[in-house]
Image: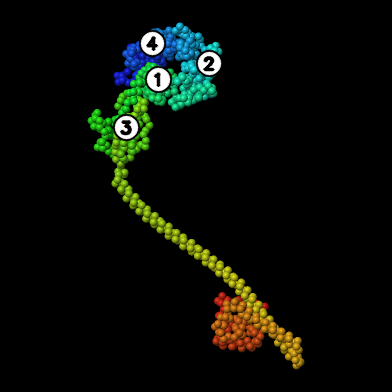
Amino acid sequence: ELVLLKSWPTDINNEIKHIYPENLNEGEGYSSVVYQNSLYVGTSNGLYRVPLTNERDLSFINGNFEPVAKTAGSAWGLSEVNGQLLLGHHDGFFQINNGKAFLVGNGSSFWNFLPYYNIIPSSLVIAGTSIGLDILKYENNHFSSEGYLPGFNEFSQFIAIDNSSIIWVAHPYRGIFKVDISDLKKPVSKIYNDKNGLPSSFDNHLFKIKNRIVVATEKGLYEYNPATDRFEFSEYFKNTFGHKNIRHLKEDSSGNIWFIENKNLGVVDYSSGKPEIIYFPELDGKMVSGFEYIYPYNKWNVFVGAEKGFYHINYENYKRKYTNNLEVKITNVKAFGKSDSLLFGGYFGQVNEILAQSQQTTPEINSRWNSLHFEFSSPLYEHQNSVLYSYLLKGYDQKWSDWTKKSEKDYTNLPGGTYTFMVEAKNNLGSESHVTSYVVDVLPPWYQTYTAYFVYTLLFIALNYLFFKKLKQLFARQREKHEEQQNHLRYLHQLELDKSEKEIVALKNEKLQAELLYKNGELASATMHLVQKGDLLSRVKEELTRLKKNSGSELAPDEFKKIMRALKEEDHMDEDWQQFSTHFDAVHLDFLRSIKKRYPNLTSNELKLCAYLHMNLCSKEIAQHMKISVRGVEIGRYRLRKKLQISTDTNLFDFLLEFSSPGENNSNLQVDRKTLRQ
């Protein structure tokens, strides 16, 4: 028995039903149409027909499908043209009338039929076949073939005619053909592929939507731009479809666009004023690849070709029913570690009691069972295939999860704390449920309790104290080491200072030595003046002696003047004693001043004698300098001893040497003496 509706009893109120007209083969659904108060469906096994009644939802008709004679085989396409029903078949094409099929043309597989002119009835009809375009002529309610379009023999499953009467053909692997049949005897065709703007030459599908020729590709919808003679990404459908891989498009009488993306059915609904995409997850993966088909007869009856028969959608009821508020319930909560423990079975009280979770019913679980398993679902059966869930574990997750069909969630190795699992549901029409939640307390392990934290605090303080003491000792050792280094540096610095001072003292000594030599030179010069004075006096004496030996006559005036000049020179020589004493004191550290201060009764000649004795001159030399005899020098030495109050046992030179500076030595005196003699 062939039945229109075959479903489980629980599906009776579902807005999506499975229809297959044949019990045995369950062939693929290729095409369908409502014509002359009958529903025709074309499958891979032939064409079937069922009479219609006044039911608004055709899925509730209690009728029997009957095969249409002579149409066994693949019934590819059904098209109503000029009020007539045409069937594209793998054996040719048929004209259907009163449930009977009449073969019109054969020789190839026919897919679809389009009137070439906008005026109905169109006298010219274009048929897409497996070997090109067949030109059909319509007269007296009958179709006849005028032959295939010359020069064009391409596979023509998808065809469309634009507002300029240009025929567009989609080839499965070559691209898109543009065919101009203004002259049927010499048609002009051009191919467009990836070199002319299309993403690829393969897998392109052609449709006429919103009065626009649209090519569906793997990267979205494309349209022809006559200004550039290229295909371009459709700006009109950009915000609606983006870059979706569209396999089939069909516009219904309300302006909604039904589509198949990959093997998922959807519709762009314009009823709210703006396009809204609605998917039908119940039918995911059930369409026929390469032969996708949608027939939106009206808003209560939409037929979709499937791998086994057809699916019927009551779109109006589907939208109305599924826009009601959804519900979501948490059905199961388990804690597991080395073993499992059931925390919640879906009810807080008795079965079917509406109770909310209270603080008393919030479970506290040991840290050994700190992994949780949540199960949840929508309680309405008909929602199951179209419901998506989103969840969040408050206290653990940072944000809500993405929408997913998965109705369970696991959390493992949760740290101690209070957690609230929240879940909500959403169907394919965008309706969302209220948030359902469940609270559970996970006790922390012993090492995360307040007692443990108190012990940690004590240990932390103790460790800090020990660390402080250790650090203090380290700083003390470093300070001692630093002080030792500073002392060593100060010692080295002092050594450098001492070395510098010694060098300065040495330089000063060298300078003093140079000054001493210079003073000795001046003293020697003064002594030479004294020697010269002695020589001058000697000459005067000799001259006076000679004059005395002469005749007893009185001295001539000239000779007298000569003697007077010599005596004046002697007076001039007395001025040198002052210069001599000054240089002598400078060289011998104020010897004359010191002895004069100690023995103030010493005369000038006695001071001179002290100076000459200090210079270690002999009596003869002293006599010459002082212009006295040697005997006079000895007498002067004797008198000097008395004034100095020294005994005869004391060496006069050694006594006078005590008035010299400690730094002076005999070598200097010897130099002076040597210089004086020179």
Circle 4 residue = 36
* Up-down relation of residue 145 to residue 598 (above or below): above
What scheme was used to colour the molecule?
A: rainbow
Q: Could you tell me residue 36's position as x and y percent?
A: 38, 10
* Up-down relation of residue 637 to residue 663 (above or below): below
Dot 1 or dot 2: first in sequence order is 2
Q: Could you tell me residue 424's position as x and y percent?
A: 33, 31
What's the residue at 55%, 76% (across, down)? Answer: 662
* Up-down relation of residue 282 to residue 344 (above or below): above
What's the residue at 67%, 82% (across, down)? Answer: 572
Q: Residues within 10 Å of mark 2 (few under 14, many from 20)?
A: some
Q: Given the image, on which type of amino acid does mark 2 rest?
A: Asp
Q: Residues within 10 Å of mark 1 (few under 14, many from 20)?
A: few
Q: Which mark is residue 435?
A: 3
Q: Secondary structure at mark 1?
A: loop
Circle 1 residue = 254
Cα distance in 3D space between marks 1 and 2: 32 Å
Q: Which mark is residue 180?
A: 2
In-front residue for pair 657/583: 583
> What is the quadrant of the C terminus in the image?
bottom right
